[in-house]
Image (cartoon, grey):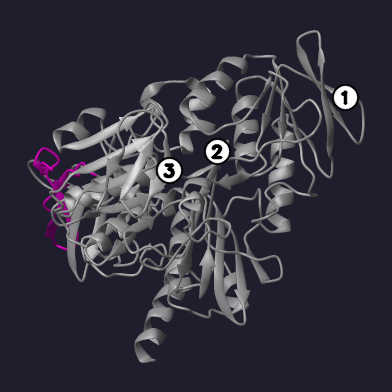
Amino acid sequence: VSPQGAVVIVGSGQSGGRAAEALRQGGHNGRITLIGDESHAPYERPALSKEFLSSAAVEKLAWVRPHAWYSEVAITTLHGRRAVGIDRARHVVELDLGTPVEYRTLILTTGARPRQLTVEGADHPLVSYLRTIEDSQELQRRLSPGARIVVIGAGFIGMEVAATAVSRGCAVTVLELAELPMARVIPRQLGDFYADFHRRKGVDLRLATAVSRITDEQGRALVHTDGGAPILADAVVVGIGVIPNVELAQGAGLDTDNGIVVDEYGRTCDPHIYAAGDVTSHFNSLLGRRVRLESWQNAQNQAIAVARNILGAGIPYAEVPWFWSDQYELNLQIAGIPRADDEIVGRGVPGGNGPVLCFHLREGRLVAAIGINSARDVRFGKEIIAMGGSPTATELSDPAVTLASLYAAAKRSAKAA
Amino acid sequence: VAATGQADAGVGLVTLCDAADVTPDMPLRVVVADAAYAVFNLDGQFYATQDQCTHGPGSLAEGFLVGAEIECPFHQGRFDIRTGRATAAPCTQALRIWTVHAIEGRLCIDPAEFRAEEL
């Protein structure tokens, strides 16, 4: 691929913005066109369930670059426009409106959309989802003190919304099918701690509870469950996962499998088409398998890696997945991909004064580090995971053994090997 | 780890900490006159930057040193501690940096003498 050929990026979220930025910074001087159905320049979404949701203050939003920057570096932005088809033979992207856009190289950063609730009454006007600035603004207007808020799903988004809403003085009920919050990722001991923490903050957290239907009650929503009385709500927020936006790729005959299938360079099965971010099912050589990640880190760094590879870098994208969630004064960080059947080693007492971490060991190797307000320790853990280090359970559980020293030991044995 | 410095090292200079307090793997956060600094030890050479990341609320002293680059614990953006320059996304704006004077085993800076590179 000639580095100077026209690059078209479909999807103007964090990934699309970072890909465009990295292309220009990497010396690409050909045309770059960024197409997205949102009316904004690329921005980061984490604040939408936290700082921005709490205040709707625009300064709480993190833009990938200021709006004016795109035209300054000659990146054409087509915001509020939808790509409806890819003609791979003619190398053009068809739009909902206007002339098709020609590409030499195409990057798909189409992201993911919230999974829809399917119970009866899920189309009640007070039921909403959280993905965009507008979603967050609309919900923020409903989070007035005393308002009754029902959150469906105790994943990261749901628990962050619950924390924000209860902090604003709302009466918050969270309904979750599983027995613990965030149970897909964090181990039982941390799940128990988070459940207690939210309850002490005033959240009515109902676990192992299914929503059966939603009805209208004089303009408010009435949420029925399989246990207890129905709950009256001024807003119902659904956070039950996301679905990758693969339709455009599928329509063009590209391989998809819970995401657009790409290799470690971000290439699809068409050598002129790449993909990055939430939408990709990508091969990660550190993990030895394909993964689809819904994270800030992957949205940014896979996009940058793809841009560099388009410019000829030839460097595989392989990072230890890393993720964070802020709820109240708790900063949760996760490095690696924890599994429930790993050997799990705890350090520190949740709710105590010291650092709190959980480590996952698989076949003797550290595969995940999860910490509460322990960013640096998780970071050392991430490095040990990347090196395939194998600290012992005894070392990991002993607060007197610093993660810095375990990292140093892993570095020494990596050098010796 | 946090420490409080003292303005006792001579005209203009303030002491941040003892050189022995900063190891290569563990940068140190020091607050002097309401300003927070991050102090680094890079193979025996000392550097001081503003502690707060220019992108968000991360404390760089809580970060992770990768070669001469400090990685912020909040979003894992990076800066070169020798120049203050932002080296990895999402960071773009340079850090303020200070020349560290090692005087009789103590690390000192002149708070008024900082540099910050333009992008």
Circle 1 residue? A230
User: In the displayed structure, does residue B35 sit left or right of residue A404?
Assistant: left
Report, in whole angstroms, how far the alpha carbon at label 1 lies from the one at label 2: 31 Å
Q: Tell me: residue A246, above or below residue A202.
A: below
Mark 2 vs mark 3, foreground winner is 3
Which of the marked residues, 2 or 3, is nearer the chain's N terminus?
Answer: 3
Can residue A159 be seen? Answer: yes
Mark before the other along the chain sequence, 1 or 2: 1
Q: Read off the residue under disc 2.
A: A329
Could you tell whether A55 is left or right of A393 in the image? Answer: left
Q: Label 2 amino acid? A: Glu
Q: Which element carries disc 1, helix, strand or loop?
A: loop
Q: Which of marks 3 and 1 is in front?
A: 3
> Who's the residue at 55% across and 19% down the image?
A138
Q: Position of residue A355 (x, y in %)?
A: 55, 56
Spatial separation of the CA atoms under disc 2 and disc 3 = 45 Å
Foreground disc of the pair 1, 2:
1
Helix, strand or loop under label 3: strand
Residue bearing the label numbered 3: A85
Q: In which quarter of the image is the C terminus of chain A?
A: bottom left
Tell me residue A272's x, y (percent).
31, 59
Residue at 66% in and 52% down: A350
- Give the magenta part as a residue range: B92-119
Chain to which mark 3 belongs: A
* Among numbered discs 3 and 1, the one appearing first in the sequence: 3
